[in-house]
Amino acid sequence: MAVYNYDVVVLGSGPAGEGAAMNAAKAGRKVAVVDDRREVGGNCTHLGTIPSKALRHSVRQIMQFNTNPMFRQIGEPRWFSFPDVLKSAERVIAKQVTSRTSYYARNRIDVFFGTGSFADEQTVEVVCPNGVVETLSAKQVVIATGSRPYRPADIDFNHPRVYDSDTILTLSHTPRRLIIYGAGVIGSEYASIFSGLGVLVDLIDNRDQLLSFLDSEISDALSYHLRTNNVLIRHNEDYERIEGLDNGVILHLKSGKKIKADALLWCNGRTGNTDKLGLENIGIKVNSRGQVTVDENYRTEVANIYAAGDVIGWPSLASAAYDQGRSASGKIVDNDTWRFVDDVPTGIYTIPEISSIGQNESELTKAKIPYEVGKAFFKSMARAQISHEPVGMLKILFHRETLEVLGVHCFGYQASEIVHIGQAIMNQKGEANSIKYFVNTTFNYPTMAEAYRVAAFDGLNRLF
């Protein structure tokens, strides 16, 4: 039996796997990537980030067409089915796969398509789709297999009306009413997508505030805009059981409520893809959600095996996963690319979108840090008016005495782009991290970025 020898074998070709593989290859290591799909890109490209964000973009365009007075002169509001809108996402997925395939080819990285598992600490066996078993020998291995939706054992996901955030992409009709169980980031994003298509959505939250990790003002704004788009948010609710019908589903809640809809989308947590890795053969244990524990160097309890991305848990963002994989590989090749990935900006692609970095008001208050607030409302911004995007604001939190920027929170049009300006300033040292940067710098006009200047003046005016 042939054995292929490598310096580094990476399990998974999502953002974490790609980051790890590329960094090792550029450092001169011989690298192989193993993925259980027949195409690279991981869940991020095929089931998660890319399809859901492409769906959101298409729905935003439909909503703008149906609400913009200029477009309304062309004709009545247009209705689009979910499968029709999904076609645009499929085109993006294909382009992403082509791009990423070329990255591996250019960097001379071998890609094995099949299910990889550990025979021992330095041997990975890959069962290919045709049944052939390939054996890879590796000095170091990076586990970057990602995650999948958490599926409780008492819910029948084989029922044709019950979906999770992966299988929802196979939905072949547009439901009139949809229950979304779980009001985290994924649940909130899909609530925006389906309500934007005219679906009546019941969003079930087992907490008392939507996305409670956000700045409370931003969370309240999201709740308001979801409700105005016919999303009924039910807080502090837990499911008792889910009853599948021939033509729908009934959600029985512990509070005694019964909610009937055409379909149910389960969005309550994720599980690490570790069950097929043979980790028991090398002594690596996982937690109840299938996640691997690592140290600050992304090394597992086995010295030559690292892990990165969703498979290690928080923050479970594609952006962070890429950097974690790159950093794990940086530690392996011992170059200057290693860093512990923290202070990651949050990007939530609801409609309108949300992004933030740094501390929020409740955290600063609890820590007794003297801070002040500067705000810029998009309804007053020329670029937002031109774009017919009046909803939203930029909020800057800064230290009253040192003027250091402590947090940036944005809600509305291009929020996930706008936040990076604040991120760049927050990463500066000393006086360079000051809210005065925004009033002493000339911004293009009209732009959304100009909101920083407006918010900075608003905050500084509160000091006097």
Image (spheres, rainbow, N blue to C red):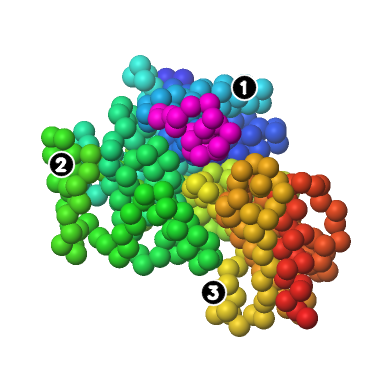
Secondary structure at numbered mark 1: helix
Q: Which numbered tag is attached to residue 274?
A: none
For the residues marked 2 and 3, what is the alpha-carbon distance in whole angstroms? 41 Å
Q: Quadrant of residue 408?
A: bottom right
The crowd level at tag 1 (other Cα within 10 Å; few <14, some 14-19, many 20+) is few
The residue to which callout 3 is attached is 362
Q: Please give left or right for residue 74 compared with residue 204 in the image.
A: right
Judge left or right: residue 431 versus residue 301.
Answer: right
Q: Nearer the viewer, residue 113 or 355?
A: 355
Q: Nearer the viewer, residue 372 or 95?
A: 372
Q: Which residues are drawn in magenta?
A: 61-80
Residue at the (18%, 39%) spot, across then down: 248
Q: Is residue 234 left or right of residue 222?
A: left
Q: Identify which amino acid the numbered label 2 is placed on.
A: Gly
Query: Could you say whether the residue bearing mark 3 is in a helix, strand or loop?
Result: helix
**439 relative to 455 in the view: left or right:** right
Q: Secondary structure at mark 2?
A: strand
| Viewer-nearest residue: 299 or 139 | 299
- Quadrant containing the C terminus is bottom right
